Image: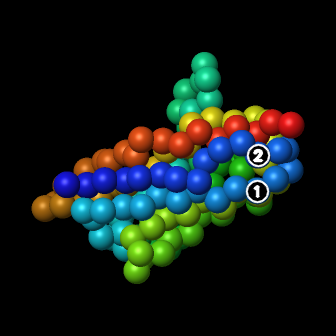
Amino acid sequence: QVQLVESGGGLVQPGGSMRLSCAASGIILSVASMGWYRQAPGKQRELVGMVVSSGNTNYADSVKGRFTISRDNANNTVYLQMNNLKPEDTAVYSCNAAYPRAGNWYEYWGQGTQVTVSS
């Protein structure tokens, strides 16, 4: 059974930093494409960034230079380091895994963690 468990959300002031973690079980992280998504109230879910099996990363323009995704294969955990946070970064952040099994790709989601940027 695949599980993705996010942690690290909460309240932070504008300009502050926060690190989210996504602990994966039931998959081998090194062969997965792992993404972080967010959804603000009244808005559609959007991709924040992702790291593929090769280690390459890409980010939404709105977070480039501020957010960094990293992967710890030994601990099967993906991180989202968020710096210089802005009120518009307030959202529920969710971890996503795209994982190959028997020639097909399967998608898994975590439950999400709330990030609130406010003074």
Can residue 87 be seen here? The reply is yes
Q: Residue at x 64, y 59 (%)?
A: 19
Question: Residue 71 at x, y = what percent?
Answer: 50, 71
Query: Which residue is depicted at the point 41% across and 53% down?
Result: 5
User: How far across and how far down the image is residue 114, in percent?
Assistant: 59, 39
Are the two marked residues, 2 and 1, in contact with CB atoms closer than 8 angstroms?
Answer: yes
Q: Is residue 109 left or right of residue 85?
A: left
Viewer-nearest residue: 99 or 74: 74
Q: Is residue 96 visible?
A: no
Question: Could you classify mark 2 by the number of other residues whose Cα lies within 10 Å: few (under 14), some (14-19), or many (20 or more)?
Answer: some
Q: How is the image coloured?
A: rainbow
Farthest residue, direction left: 102
Estimate the x, y position of residue 57 in percent, counting from the top left. Answer: 56, 65
What kind of residue is marked 2?
Answer: Val
Residue at 76% over, 56% down: 17
> Mark on residue 88?
none
Q: Quadrant of the C terminus?
A: top right
Element under disc 1: loop
Tag 2 residue: 12
Q: Which numbered marker is on residue 17?
A: 1
Q: Indicate the position of residue 81 as horizontal and vertical percent values.
A: 66, 61
Q: CA distance from mark 2 to mark 1?
A: 7 Å
Split into 4 quadrants, where in the image is the N terminus? bottom left
